[in-house]
Amino acid sequence: MDPYKPQVDLPLFAIELLREGPTMLRDLGRHLMPRQGSGSPRNIADANLAWQFGWAPLVNDVGRMFDLAHATNDRMRYLRNLEDGNRVHRSLQSNKEIRNEKTSNAVTIGSRAAGMNPQWCFTADVRVREFVDVWYSANGKLLNTIPDNLFTTRSLSNRQMLGLRLHPTTMWNAIPWSWLTDYFSNFGDVLEASETLASLKVTRMCVMQKNTTFSLLENARVSPGVTHNAESAIMKLTQKARTVSANPTPRLAATPWLNARQAGILGSLAVVAAFRGRTSQW
């Protein structure tokens, strides 16, 4: 909900470019002019780290700059809505798959009818897929006043979108290895949320979640003389929950679960550390 969150954090962009630029160019040279041993685990791990911490953020920031004009107009409307104390709606997750599991021979139906296999007449695997939607609504009131002049408001929005004001979150993200702390705790999120509450009063927040689980029969096998309808072999379970908070405040918490990207980065770091001190193949 931060009304001053930048679209492209230019100070952080400059710091990371100066810090990671030489490594990015080195790895680009390795990719364009591969030599013997370029496919070694060490070089593959280096390439992954160069992409995750160098090229991927660069491409993302450049892409956001092209959308700066549209984003600035949206920010201006958002600031006016917050100044009036309007309700804010945001989607956090939309139809995200969080589970996809298959159990072999999970369903077996037997029969002792004449002429039937005495052990079973229907056997199938079961696949369970679960999807989640998370969204929230909140009442927010801007604590600062917005200039009435359209030109001044647009200039203010442009500075905000480019991060041209001192952000504690920018300083935190600029610290080397601070990202590793954020892998296992929500310190960065708490810092950002606290920064938001310095300029925005949130009196009520309602976070809602809907989990939709499908159970499907796959690879059905039947005995001779038995038929089944595959279209009816689906069960659906929907669960809904919500949490309402008055005057919400951020709290520190552990986040011990790693996603695939984070696990890949830590794996690449482990490979690089294991090969450190050996003769480079480059």
Image (tube, rainbow, N blue to C red):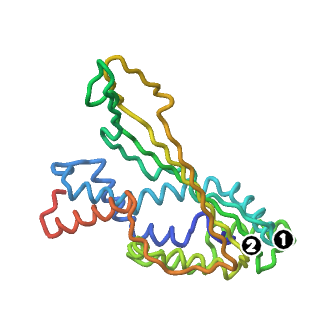
User: Residue 117's spot in the image, x, y percent?
Assistant: 27, 24
Which amino acid, by three-letter code, is at mark 1?
Answer: Asp
* Residue tagged 1: 84
Residue that lies at the very extreme toward the right in this rendered image: 148
Name the residue nearer the viewer: 108 or 229.
108
Q: Which mark is residue 140?
A: 2
Is residue 64 at all visible to an observer of this figure? Answer: no
For disc 1, the neighbor class at 10 Å (few under 14, some 14 to 19, many from 20) is: few
The correct choice, above or below, for 102 with respect to 246 in the image is: above
Q: Is residue 107 left or right of residue 92?
A: left
Q: Distance of mark 1 from mark 2, alpha carbons? A: 9 Å
Q: Is residue 131 left or right of residue 90?
A: left
The secondary structure type at the circle numbered 2 is strand
User: Residue 173's spot in the image, x, y percent?
Assistant: 48, 74
Q: Is residue 278 left or right of residue 184?
A: left
Q: Residue at x 42, y 57 (%)?
A: 55
